[in-house]
Image: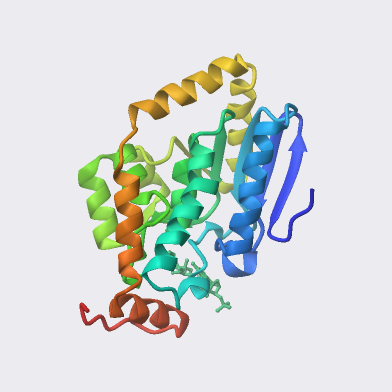
């Protein structure tokens, strides 16, 4: 299967999936999300695939977020729908995948990019990676599960600081707070990911699937629904219009709080 925005190649029993919009720092536009949803669904059907290694093209970004240019004119309902569809078809689908996904974070993992990495079962970052949820700079909140998964991974205190400040953190800081499992030099990123996946795919496949289901069950909550509603609500604010316009016009936003 060939895609416009994604490279996918089976090597041994590991499917290498690369988000391939390097010029836009691999930002997730609608087409990319659609293709990603197909890849994730296909993984479950393909018995030759035992695990997935997910990364971004180039050396600068894993994924720099959802594509801001696409949703700048959205209203409340469209915003809510954006979050709901994306969560179900990509982010939740990855988290619930019967086969493990490993995110090899090769650079910026921001907004939807960090949310994508957090939906994966394991995260390894290169030393140059920068991670953050900067949505509040756009008058938004994370909409692809970020408020829930970051809190689950690093605890409420750190999650609130990261989301409210919109600060990016380094790979080393991310490892310290449990947001990534390992940090390695960029040249060793794929090697480290491959070693870990080689170990995992030696294990019993059905037990791996059961373990994923059981671990996910420990974290079940309804916060995702609240996030979807709040995300949609942001689209009805002037601050959202100002935040996205300022990004696209390459200037600082002037928020009115309306
Ligand atoms: N959506 C749409 N386009 C994006 C994008 C996004 N999330 N992130 C980067 N891009 C585009 C830029 O607009 C730019 O396009 P252009 O060359 O056509 O102008 C290109 O990718 C390169 O990005 P640029 O901003 O020039 O690179 P930089 O090195 O100066 O800055 C970042 C890198 C990651 C700090 C900056 O791109 C950024 O802040 N991105 C948005 C992050 C974000 O808010 N994500 C959450 C979205 S919900």
From the viewer's perspective, is residue 207 above or below residue 31? above
Q: Is residue 128 visible?
A: no
Return the x and y of residue 56 as percentages of the image width and height: 60, 53
Q: How is the image coloured?
A: rainbow
From the viewer's perspective, is residue 236 above or below residue 179? below
User: Toward which corner of the image does residue 214 lie, by quadrant?
Assistant: top left
Residue pictured at 37% horizontal, 50% vertical: 146
Quadrant where the C terminus sits is: bottom left
Residue pictured at 24% horizontal, 60% vertical: 164
Q: Nearer the viewer, residue 171 or 78?
A: 78
Residue pictured at 44% horizontal, 50% vertical: 115
Q: Nearer the viewer, residue 132 or 101?
A: 101
Return the x and y of residue 75 as percentages of the image width and height: 40, 73
Return the x and y of residue 106 as percentages of the image width and height: 55, 51
Number of residue marks = 0
User: Toward which corner of the image does residue 104 lie, by quadrant?
Assistant: top right
Side of 161 relative to 93 (left or right): left
Residue pictured at 51% horizontal, 75% vertical: 69
Residue sitting farthest toward the right: 1
Residue sitting farthest toward the front: 77
Q: Is residue 40 visible?
A: yes
Return the x and y of residue 169 as percentages of the image width and height: 35, 54
From the viewer's perspective, is residue 204 above or below residue 5? above
């Amino acid at each position: 299967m060939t895609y416009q925005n994604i490279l996918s190649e089976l090597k041994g029993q590991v499917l290498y999936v690369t988000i391939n919009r390097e010029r836009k720092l691999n930002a997730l536009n609608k087409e990319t999300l659609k293709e990603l949803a197909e890849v994730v669904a296909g993984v479950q059907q393909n018995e030759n695939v035992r695990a997935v290694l997910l990364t971004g093209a180039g050396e600068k970004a894993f994924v720099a977020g959802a594509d801001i240019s696409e949703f700048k004119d959205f209203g409340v309902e469209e915003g809510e729908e954006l979050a709901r569809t994306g969560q179900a078809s990509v982010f939740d689908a990855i988290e619930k995948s019967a086969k493990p996904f490993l995110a090899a974070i090769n650079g910026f993992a921001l907004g939807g990019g960090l949310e994508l990495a957090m939906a994966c079962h394991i995260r390894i970052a290169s030393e140059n990676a920068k991670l953050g949820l900067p949505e509040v700079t756009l008058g938004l909140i994370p909409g692809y599960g970020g408020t829930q998964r970051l809190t689950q991974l690093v605890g409420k205190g750190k999650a609130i600081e990261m989301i409210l400040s919109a600060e990016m953190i380094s790979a080393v800081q991310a490892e310290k707070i449990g947001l990534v499992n390992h940090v390695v030099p960029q040249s060793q990123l794929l090697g480290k990911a491959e070693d870990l996946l080689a170990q995992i795919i030696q294990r019993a496949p059905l037990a791996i699937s059961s373990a994923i289901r059981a671990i996910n069950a420990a974290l079940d909550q309804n916060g995702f629904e609240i996030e979807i509603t709040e995300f949609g609500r942001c689209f009805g604010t002037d601050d959202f219009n100002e935040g996205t316009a300022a990004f696209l016009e390459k200037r600082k936003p002037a928020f009115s709080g309306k």
